[in-house]
Image: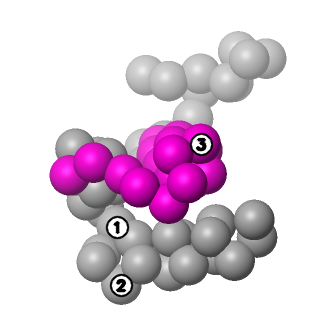
Amino acid sequence: MSTTPRGRTLPRSERHSVSRTLAALQFAKRLAANRGRVSPTDIAILRRAGFTDHEVSEISSRVIASE
């Protein structure tokens, strides 16, 4: 069971949401740090978190546009 910093236990659906959010943020950070280049492993991590190719493209577009 996952818990919040305050010790609250998260329901399964919220844990999935949090893991997706963290995967997206880590991907965005790598994308920005590497000037738009990411590895196939970075993309695979997002896919394992449940993101579609379209969603990966959308995240990439927004990060690149914000620079």
Q: Position of residue 23 (x, y in %)?
A: 46, 46
Residue displayed at 51% across by 46% down: 34
Residue on which the image places disc 3: 33
Q: Kindly report the distance in space between the C-alpha atoms of the residues bearing marks 2 and 3.
A: 22 Å
Residue displayed at 55% across by 54% down: 35
Residue displayed at 28% across by 77% down: 53
Q: Which quadrant does the C terminus fall into?
A: bottom right
Q: Which quadrant does the N terminus fall into?
A: top left
Q: Is residue 7 above or below residue 47?
A: above
State which quadrant residue 8 falls in. Answer: top right
Q: Secondary structure at mark 1?
A: loop
44 sits left or right of 24 in the view: left
Q: Residues within 10 Å of mark 1 (few under 14, many from 20)?
A: some
Q: Is residue 19 magenta?
A: yes
> For the residue marked with disc 3, what is the amino acid?
Ala
Q: Is residue 35 magenta?
A: yes
Q: Is residue 56 above or below residue 23?
A: below
Q: Secondary structure at mark 3?
A: helix
Q: Nearer the viewer, residue 49 or 31?
A: 31
47 sits left or right of 29 in the view: left
Residue on which the image places disc 1: 51
User: Of discs 2 and 3, which sits in the foreground?
Assistant: 3
Q: Position of residue 19 (x, y in %)?
A: 47, 43
The residue segment tinted magenta is 17-40
Residue on which the image places disc 2: 54
Q: Secondary structure at mark 2?
A: helix
Q: Position of residue 29 (x, y in %)?
A: 60, 44
